[in-house]
Amino acid sequence: MDNDELARALGQYVRTRRVQLGLTQRQVKEHLGFSAQFLGRIEKGQAMVPEEALITLINVLGLDRAELENIFIGANKRHIAQLFQKAQQKSSGGVSSNSGEGTLSTGLGDPRSFLVDNQLQ
């Protein structure tokens, strides 16, 4: 997953929710145990929210589970799409997208046998 993209989306959501509640960064940071400056970096997408802080933010800001899931799922889907794009670019010849189903035809046969035959030692 692209952590920069996830950090931006998550930070934007945290900031939006904080502002909706009429809270300052100072008020929120008191619950988190780190500086308002670090919270500012999180809200700008310049730092990832540590897991313990995210748990606290869920409670303090009443973050919505469905919205958080959408942020994480969206970032994961975009990351997977990027991986497939890079795999297609890296592969030489015989690459097709297989009707948009998200699989690659590499001309290497069964991917499982390819992996077994080419294990890293």
Image: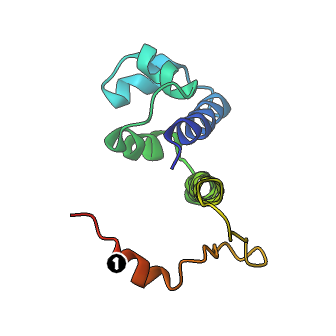
Q: Position of residue 101 (x, y in %)?
A: 71, 77
Coloration of the structure image? rainbow
Give the left or right position of residue 60, taking residue 121 as reference: right
Q: Position of residue 55 (x, y in %)?
A: 38, 47
Query: Which residue carries the number 1 mark?
Result: 117
Give the left or right position of residue 50, taking residue 43 as reference: left
Quarter of the image where the C terminus is located: bottom left
**Image quadrant of residue 92?**
bottom right
Q: Residue at x 46, y 17 (%)?
A: 26
Q: Position of residue 107 (x, y in %)?
A: 60, 77
**Residue type beneath disc 1:** Asp
Determine whether 37 is above or below 57 in the image.
above
Give the left or right position of residue 3, taking residue 100 as reference: left
Q: Give 92 or 116, whichever is nearer the viewer.
A: 92
Q: Give 36 or 8, whichever is nearer the viewer.
A: 8
- Give neighbour class at mark 1: few <14, some 14-19, many 20+ (Cα, 10 Å): few
Secondary structure beneath disc 1? helix
Determine whether 108 is above or below 82 in the image.
below
Determine whether 110 is above or below 2 in the image.
below
Q: Give 66 or 42, whichever is nearer the viewer.
A: 42
Residue that lies at the very extreme toward the right in this rendered image? 99
Residue that lies at the very extreme toward the left in this rendered image? 121
> How many marks can you see?
1
Residue that lies at the very extreme toward the front in this rendered image? 93
Q: Residue at x 44, y 46 (%)?
A: 59
Q: Position of residue 87 (x, y in %)?
A: 58, 59
Q: Residue at x 51, y 50 (%)?
A: 1
